Structure formats: C-alpha cells, structure tokens
Amino acid sequence: MANPRGFLEVHRAPLAIEHAVAGNDTVTAERELTAARDKPSNRFRSFESETNALGYRLLAARKLEQALVVFRLNTRAYPGSANTFDSLGEALLSAGYREAAIDAYRKALALDPNFQSSAHALRGLGVR
C-alpha cells in the first residue's frame, strides 16, 4: 500500500487553503500558502499553479468570492507572476468587476509584455 501519510502531507496545503477560504479565514489561508511555498521540501512543487487550479475550481463551481480570495492570495504569494494577475483578471471579470479586471490584466502585462492571454482579454474589452 502506498504511503497515505505522504499523500496527505503532499495535498495538505491546497486543502487547508480551500478550507480556510470557505470559512472566510483569509489569514490562515495566506499563512498556509506562504508556509507551503517556503518549506524547503516543497522547492520542486508549484504552489502557484496548485493555488491557481484551486481558484479555477471555485470559479467553475460559481463560488466567485472564494475564487477571488484565492486568486488574490496567489498574487500576493507570487507578485512577480503575470499568470497570477491574468487569472485574477479573469475571475474579476467573471464576477462583474470590469475595471478591476482591466487593472489586473494591465499588471500582468506590466510584468510580462508578451503575456498573450492578458493582451487578448484587454482587446476583447476594447481596452488598449
């Protein structure tokens, strides 16, 4: 039998973040993400993409406010990532926050001027 403890340890952070967000405990969610990101044994894991995937799962479930919290946490944990801001922009737009979405897409492009997803989204919104 595979090591269930190892499985649980590997998947603890995303589950803890999701649980904290569901309980409106953003402090704990951010603490869990930061601790997981900074743990030396996790240096080869991508908590940025795992957190993004959580945000998209919540978005698909129409849990818009929870998704926004997760995407905002991800931008704070990975402030140099265009992808985190692009994903936040998508969630903001889905939630009806057009101007905030534009700001997020612009931030993504400021970080990476060649980030096509954000450029495409801004063109679709009629924004340069």
Image (cartoon, rainbow, N blue to C red):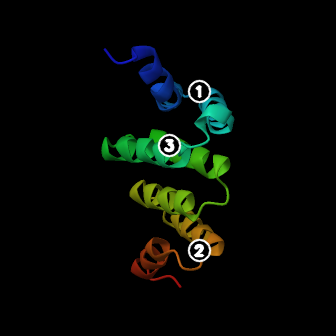
Q: Looking at the image, is 103 positioned above or below residue 71? A: below
Which amino acid lies under the numbered mark 1 shown in the image of this protein?
Asp
Q: Could you tell me which quadrant the N terminus lies in?
A: top left
Q: Which comes before the other along the chain, label 3 or label 1?
A: 1
Q: Looking at the image, is 100 positioned above or below residue 123? A: above
At x 42%, y 23%, the residue is 7
**Residue 99 placement (x, y as % from top left):** 54, 67
Looking at the image, which is closer to me, 6 or 25? 6
**Residue, disc 1:** 25
Q: For marks 2 and 1, give the CA distance.
A: 30 Å
Q: For marks 3 and 1, give the CA distance.
A: 16 Å
Which amino acid lies under the numbered mark 2 shown in the image of this protein?
Leu
Q: Which comes before the other along the chain, label 3 or label 2?
A: 3
Looking at the image, which is closer to me, 79 or 92? 79
**Residue, disc 2:** 109
Q: Which comes before the other along the chain, label 2 or label 1?
A: 1
**Residue 87 placement (x, y as % from top left):** 48, 58
